Image (cartoon, grey):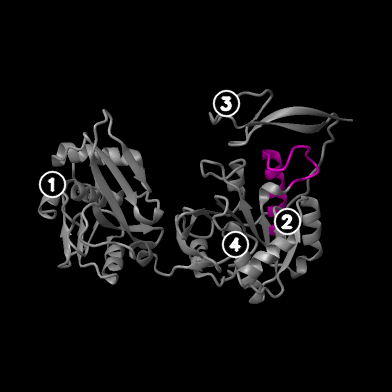
Amino acid sequence: MSKTKKQYVCSNCGSVAAKWSGQCFDCSAWGTIDEELVTSQSISVARIGNVLPIEAFDSSITEKIRIITPIEELNRVLGGGLVPASAILIGGDPGIGKSTLLLQLSSQLSNAGTKCLYITGEESTDQVKLRASRLGLKPEGNSIMAATNIHDILATIDAAKNNLDLVVIDSIQTMYSGDFSSAPGTVSQIRACTHELITYAKQNNIILLLVGHVTKDGQLAGPKVLEHMVDTVLYFEGDHSQHFRILRSIKNRFGGVNEIGVFEMTTEGLKEVANPSELFLMERDFNVSGTSVFAGIEGSRPLLVEVQALIAPSNMPTPRRSVVGWDTSRLSMILAVLSVRYGLNLSTYEVYLSIAGGLKITEPAVDLAVAAALISAATNKPLPEGSIFFGEIGLSGEVRKTAQADMRIKEAMKLGFNKMICAPHPNLSAKNIETLSHIKQLKGIIS
């Protein structure tokens, strides 16, 4: 005999409660509790498992040969290519280009001899074919199927497993299992469907690419365990008003994290950007106050971006602080340090700061570039032409050195910059490097 009962599951952390509440008691998230129906067996039967072989930890291993994709930016993010029997999760905002990238990838791989199956749960097969035709793709040997039942999908894959190397699931939130009465997209459905797909893919040496929806906060929808189950988690970043997209690795068991690949969205799909620094600086105006160039590092890639600042008088009791592409609390700290350690008081001014191109910067090395842009905007004096800035600023006003300074300088010199302003580094002694130990020394540069 079986009976059905209700349980309440948090879509953010996956915790289960016996009754509904507005806030999850485990992760403190509001409005994430969903009702699910579960079927339980009243009679439990003891099962005896099989004895499995145990391997020595120092035994020899066989290195799996990666599949090098025709998309070099994707290879960079993945750590060198696709690893057989791996599961990759790609998330991003609606319309950012997830399905376009995977359609281009599967089409180009199929033309190179890799057997691919594209499974869509959101569109019909004709819609996907029309999109491929619009993008100018002519896949040879690429298969397509529209399905949402996980048991039908696994049965179809199993029937053609000898002729399959890669399977694309678009998207995992549309898949459901008949073993659960809850709707597709709930915690139990996503967890069960993902587990069955990953288990089958690893047993049969098939590469699995999963598309995941995101919440309004930009996080992957569904339980956090979804990110733990897969081998690689990639995020598509970018603004719909901008023409470029950034693919960033958040988790990678076969490579480094925080690697980025830069793409440009065109009418023919996603195009690779081999030198993203030129893309972010191509519309830069020279001899304009309030702008500086920051030499950053994204993963293992040096990247030059423009930092723009604007200072405007304000009659409001609390002047506005607006930041695009950076941390607001970090800006408040820099403004406080400039007021106390540098002597620049902006408490009666509105401050606007933007990272040009819509790129999001998280590393603290951008502090010096932000401070230089703010001082330049406040004094209405442009920074020296051909100069770049990088360095972390402490609360006492000192400028601290950052990692991989040689890579930053090399990238800047390649693009024609001839004045590097940074913290003192013991291994850097070039003539075009000007070192700062305190932000007060910026007075001698901005004059």
- Residues at badges 1 and 4 in contact (C-beta under 8 Å)? no
Left or right? Give the position of 344 relative to 33. left
Is disc 4 placed on a helix, strand or loop?
Answer: helix
Which amino acid type is shown beneath numbered disc 4? Thr
Q: Estimate the x, y position of residue 231 in percent, counting from the top left.
A: 58, 54
The three-letter code of the residue at mark 3 reads Gln
Q: Earlier in the sequence, mark 2 or mark 3?
A: 3
For disc 3, the neighbor class at 10 Å (few under 14, some 14 to 19, many from 20) is: some
Which residue is situated farthest in the front direction here? Answer: 315
Q: CA distance from mark 2 to mark 4?
A: 25 Å
Q: Which residues are magenta?
A: 176-202
| Front: mark 4 or 3 | 4
The residue sitting at 75% across, 27% down in the picture is 6
Secondary structure of the residue carrying tag 1 is: helix
Q: Which mark is residue 200?
A: 2
Marks 2, 3: nearer the viewer: 3
Near-viewer residue (129 or 398): 129
For the C terminus, give its image quadrant. bottom left
Earlier sequence position, callout 2 versus callout 4 = 4
194 sits left or right of 89 in the view: right
The span from disc 4 to disc 3 (Cα, nearest Å) is 37 Å
Spot occupied by residue 369 in the image (x, y as percentages of width and height): 25, 52
Mark 4 — residue? 100
Q: Residue 440, labelled with which disc? A: 1
